[in-house]
Image (cartoon, grey):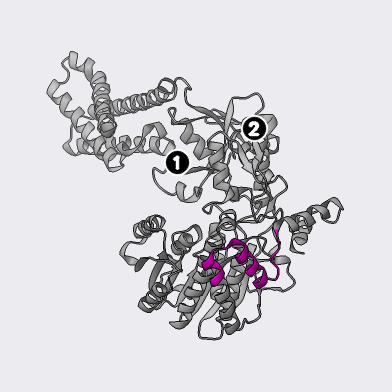
């Protein structure tokens, strides 16, 4: 039935035009003033004239349950132009003018009947087909601007949809108290909790584009107080620009990056493009969270060839399909399933592809797992970096960029200590044609194994949400931010620098969990419990504020800092690599820890660092989060 909706409406219109005009001429037909054959001929001619213009104007391509003023105007235009054509033909044929006069009245009557049918259909859709609210939720739309009104129109026109619009909420005084599509506008948004109290609303839809960071944070705080599930319209400009696009389909659930209190950092795309365009780029760990986003962004800058290297075939296969879907044959792509631990294989790959730019993202990164398997962290992180960096230098790569971590600063765990040594490796290989650099950043939202996907999964399961310690704080950035940093830092790289991103304000993990639960429509500790499970092996309470180091200076981009590190003698580096390799081969955990503590002067136990931080708090020496981070760095 839906497939032939346009044809059905056309048939109904034909019947209406014929019936209305036949009714007007029927008394004359009874008096035998006109002949039946002439009447049928004239009504047929009028109908054909009208349908010609209705089809030209694509009247029957519209979905009348979504009809607005444009659709009604097009219907009127088609009827008017059709009648004019009919009148011109009659005057040309010099027929009686009574046909034109009666046809004008018949056309007007038919237009009214056609509009009535369409209105009745809309009423049926809204009242009869939408009867009953089973499985549907009442929603409040935040924002009564163009975007909010467009969304409201879509929801009102879809009575079988998931949402029943209950009200709009806006700050504009001239809108508050009015009605749009029969739905009341309330406000202001700062009174959201009060406005929705004792209402059936369970869903909130944020439909205000281009909010500044401070206002968005405030609105999300108000939303969290209601315990309603929050949705946000994604990419509203592009959605509105597409014919037939669904705003409802473009809604997404709240993401943690919405709660960071800052807009995503945007870096210099023109600089990155000139750095990567027309070059062969190799990415190790390309199937991982950071590596795959690196590959996606690099592909958009027009490389001569993109080479993806990873040992994990499933994620790499998925990335390959994504890139082929997005770029097809226009992207020269090579995928190699290989381990960076295999020095001979890495040498073969570099010899085959001769990459000009290398991004080394392959690493073991999960802190608790590496505490239990330190030899694997050493082999993969330290020696994987050495094998890749050595091959890059041997085959004349222009730049080599290491993906590092904030945990390499004064490390308290195996993963951080091995990443510190990775940075030392690239310092030891400096001096040739290849420019080495490291990019250091903190927690990445949405990466494999990060806390946010875990929170969301736990909420979906009904709880509990688990956090390691209610006092813990972290600095966060998004995956696109991290990757843009890596790309732009690579363009800056000259010789052995370590680049750091200004990550904004720290986030209290407990607050994060509570907000995410509330914005998912639940009440913390009532619907979803939050349980403290204790710090994991090697974990700090307070992260380092990386940009607080006196050794950092700003680059051309005010969000990127650089630390100049001293050279490492290559001969000394090879000596301690041999010592570390021997310890890793023997697999003795205590021996590996002993060697690492010798090689990493700032390596301390997390228990010691956490005790000092807690003691400082109790003594009143650190009352702000920045002070706590500084204590952890002592």
Q: Quadrant of the C terminus?
A: bottom right
Residue furthest to the bottom in view is 432
Q: Quadrant of residue 465?
A: top right
Residue 65 position in % (x across, y down): 39, 31
Seen in the picture, residue 12 relative to 511 is either above or below; the reply is: above
* Most distant residue in the right direction: 619
* 588 part of magenta stretch: yes
Q: Indicate whether 182 appears above or below 469.
A: above
Density class for disc 2 (Cα within 10 Å; few <14, some 14-19, many ≥20) is some
Q: Which residue is mark 2?
A: 523
- Residue 168's label in the rendered image is none
Residue 76 visible in the shown view? yes
Towards the viewer: 617 or 107: 617
385 sits to left or right of 469:
left
Element at label 2: loop
Residue extent of the magenta highlight: 582-605
- Front: mark 2 or 1: 2
* Element class at badge 1: helix
Q: Is residue 172 visible?
A: no
| 218 or 290: nearer the viewer | 290
Question: Toward the viewer: 45 or 359?
Answer: 359
Closer to the chain start, of discs 2 and 1, is: 1
**Left/right of residue 9 with respect to residue 357 in the rendered view:** left
* Rendered location of residue 329, percent (x, y): 31, 65
Q: Which residue is mark 1?
A: 249
User: How far from the left and from the top, in percent, is residue 148?
Assistant: 54, 40
Camera-side residue of 321 and 270: 321
- State the image coordinates of residue 480 (x, y, percent, origin top left): 53, 59
539 lies above or below 138: below
């Amino acid at each position: 039935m839906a497939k032939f909706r346009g044809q059905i409406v056309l048939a109904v219109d034909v019947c209406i035009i014929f019936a209305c005009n036949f009714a007007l001429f029927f008394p004359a037909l009874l008096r035998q003033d006109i002949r039946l054959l002439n009447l049928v001929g004239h009504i047929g001619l009028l109908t054909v004239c009208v349908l010609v213009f209705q089809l030209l104007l694509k009247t029957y391509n519209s979905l009348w349950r979504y009809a607005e003023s444009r659709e009604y105007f097009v219907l009127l235009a088609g009827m008017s132009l059709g009648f004019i054509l009919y009148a011109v033909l009659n005057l040309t044929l010099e027929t009686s003018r009574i046909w034109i006069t009666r046809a004008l009245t018949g056309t007007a009557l038919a237009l009214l009947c056609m509009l009535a049918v369409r209105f009745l259909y809309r009423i049926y859709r809204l009242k009869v087909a939408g009867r009953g609210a089973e499985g549907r939720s009442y929603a409040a739309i935040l924002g009564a601007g163009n975007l909010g009104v467009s969304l409201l129109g879509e929801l009102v026109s879809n009575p079988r949809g998931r949402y029943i619009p209950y009200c709009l909420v806006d700050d504009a005084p001239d809108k508050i108290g009015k009605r749009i599509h029969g739905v009341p506008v309330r406000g202001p948004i700062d009174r959201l909790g009060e406005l929705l109290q004792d209402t059936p609303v369970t869903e909130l839809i944020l439909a205000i584009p281009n909010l500044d960071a401070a206002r968005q944070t405030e609105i999300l705080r108000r939303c969290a107080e209601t315990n309603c599930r929050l949705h946000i319209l994604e990419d509203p400009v592009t959605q509105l620009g597409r014919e037939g696009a669904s705003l409802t389909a473009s809604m997404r659930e709240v993401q943690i990056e919405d709660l960071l209190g800052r807009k995503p950092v945007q870096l210099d795309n023109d600089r990155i493009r000139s750095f990567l365009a027309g070059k062969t780029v190799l990415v190790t760990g390309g199937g991982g969270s950071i590596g795959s986003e690196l590959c996606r962004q690099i592909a958009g800058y027009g490389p001569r060839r993109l080479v993806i290297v990873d040992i994990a075939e499933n994620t790499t296969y998925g990335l390959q399909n994504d890139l082929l879907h997005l770029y097809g044959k226009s992207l020269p792509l090579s995928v190699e399933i290989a381990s960076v631990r295999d020095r001979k294989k890495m040498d073969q790959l570099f010899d085959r592809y001769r990459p000009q730019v290398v991004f080394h993202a392959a690493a073991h990164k999960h802190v608790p797992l590496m505490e239990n398997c330190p030899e694997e962290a050493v082999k993969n992180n330290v020696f994987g970096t050495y094998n890749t960096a050595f091959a890059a230098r041997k085959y004349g790569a222009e730049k080599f960029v290491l993906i590092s971590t904030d945990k390499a600063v004064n490390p308290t765990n195996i993963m951080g200590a091995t990443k510190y040594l990775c940075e030392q490796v690239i310092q030891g290989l400096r001096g040739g044609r290849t420019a080495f650099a490291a990019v250091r950043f903190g927690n990445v939202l949405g990466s494999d194994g990060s806390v946010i996907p875990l929170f969301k999964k736990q909420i979906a399961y009904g709880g509990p949400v688990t956090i390691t310690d209610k006092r813990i704080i972290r600095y966060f950035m998004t995956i696109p931010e991290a990757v843009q940093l890596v790309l732009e830092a690579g363009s800056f790289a000259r010789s052995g620098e370590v680049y750091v991103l200004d990550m904004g304000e720290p986030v209290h993990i407990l607050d994060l969990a509570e907000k995410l639960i509330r914005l998912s429509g639940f009440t913390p500790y009532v619907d979803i419990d939050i349980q403290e499970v204790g710090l994991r092996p090697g974990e700090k309470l307070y992260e380092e504020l990386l940009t607080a180091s006196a050794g950092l200076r700003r680059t051309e981009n005010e969000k990127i800092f650089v630390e100049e590190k001293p050279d490492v003698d290559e001969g000394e580096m090879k000596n301690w690599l041999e010592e570390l390799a021997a310890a890793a081969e023997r697999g003795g955990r205590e021996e590996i820890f002993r060697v690492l503590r010798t090689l990493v002067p700032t390596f301390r136990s997390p228990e010691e660092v956490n005790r000092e931080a807690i003691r400082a708090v109790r003594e009143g020496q650190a009352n702000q989060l920045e002070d706590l981070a500084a204590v952890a760095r002592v």
